[in-house]
Image (tube, helix red, strand yellow):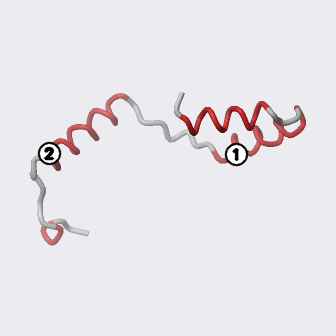
Amino acid sequence: MSPRTSQVAAMFDNMTEQEQALIFALMLRLATDDIATPEDIAAHEEAMEAWRKGKTVPLGSVAL
């Protein structure tokens, strides 16, 4: 668990059950279903590797 995650978990554990319920409801409203699939992650890693190797195109050559 990352230090930030541990800190948030500790804060959540120190709340009353009523406070936890409110925070949980808020988190559900803020969470999206936009989850990266394994294919998304692989495509991103491939693109980042190409970028690190300098395989990019000038912005002006991209139709916006």
Q: Which of 45 and 16 is in front in this view?
A: 16
Q: Position of residue 18 (x, y in %)?
A: 90, 36
- 4 versus 61 height, above or below: above
Disc 1 on helix, strand or loop? helix
Crowd band around label 2 with a 10 angstrom C-alpha radius: few (<14), some (14–19), many (20+): few
Image position, residue 13 (x, y; %): 77, 30
Extreme bottom residue here? 60
Q: In this view, does 21 lie above or below 48?
A: above
The C terminus lies in quadrant: bottom left
Earlier residue among tags 2 and 1: 1
Q: Which three-letter amino acid code belongs to the residue tagged 2?
A: Ala
Q: Tell me if 18 is positioned left or right of 28 in this view.
A: right
Q: Which of marks 2 and 1 is in front?
A: 2
Label 1: how many residues lie within 10 Å, few (<14), some (14-19) or many (20+)? few
* Residue located at (20% from left, 68% from top): 63
Name the residue type under label 1: Arg
Residue for badge 2 = 50
- Mark 2 lies on a secondary structure that is helix
Which residue is at 11% across, 60% downward?
57
In the rendering, which numbered label is found on residue 29?
Answer: 1
Image quarter of residue 29: top right
Asked if residue 58 is positioned above or below residue 10 in the image, the reply reads below
